[in-house]
Amino acid sequence: MNKNIKIGVPSKGRLRNDILKIFKKNNLSLISERGERDLLGSIKELKKIEVLYLHAREIIERLGDGSLDLGFSGYDLLKESEINIQNKINVTKKYIFGKATLVVAIPDPWIDVQTIADLEEIAFEFKDKKKKRLRVATKYPNLTREFLFSKGVTQFKLVGSLGATEAYPFTGSSEIITDITSTGETLKANNLRILKDGQILKSQACMMTSKLSFKKYEIKKLIKLLSKY
């Protein structure tokens, strides 16, 4: 007996709305018995498919452990995940929406700091004069650590961000941040500036499949269908 195919769709935000448009454009009707807040759904025109509405980060996790066959999430969240998870996932389509960039941003008043090299100097000053490490608030610890190390910045401490990361430098929770931005306007509005060479990663919405499911005939058909946008 064939098992149902499980598809992960983001449960909220702009990404959810953009993904739902893909189904609509391909004349596929998503059905949820309890309306928009339902965490489970199906596709009227296609049998044996379960739709699960999950946090975009959880979609990556579940593609990695094989409990989802196909899912939609951001490229940034894939690259932030552990390498053993990344190795179990195929990116089958990159869409033209959901574009954003993960960047290093600093408070505007730091006029002497324009590049990562300047940041390295500041980090050493913090260590030598203030006897503490430069704090970096982020929701992307793996990508941030990897990027800063690759640029020779080693004297820093990561602070996990749970809310609006751009507020952290002004509430005394961190000195600088790394954050995902599509226009940079929110950073500017919060008196933050992106370093000239502070681009960590370009991201966009992607369709991804678990490598365990990728070769299934039904999955290949779905990939073809949902690649049209």
Image (tube, rainbow, N blue to C red):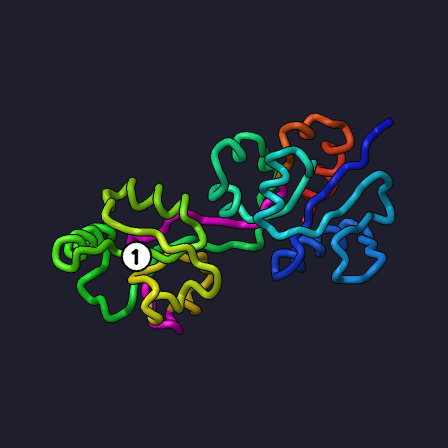
Viewer-nearest residue: 206 or 149: 149
Tell me which residue sits at (57%, 48%) in the image.
57
Q: Residue furthest front?
A: 131
The image shows residue 78 at horizontal and vertical percentages of: 52, 42
Tell me which residue sits at (72%, 43%) in the image.
7
Identify which amino acid the numbered label 1 is placed on. Answer: Arg
Viewer-nearest residue: 161 or 203: 161
Viewer-nearest residue: 23 or 59: 59
Residue 173 is covered by the magenta coloring: no
The image shows residue 66 at horizontal and vertical percentages of: 66, 33
* Residue matched to label 1: 135
Residue 119 picture quarter: bottom left
- Image position of 123 (left or right of 48): left
Residue 205 is covered by the magenta coloring: yes
- Image position of 165 (left or right of 49): left
Residue 179 picture quarter: bottom left
- Image position of 86 (left or right of 44): left
Task: Write the start and end of the magenta stretch as one range.
Answer: 188-207
The image shows residue 223 at horizontal and vertical percentages of: 70, 37
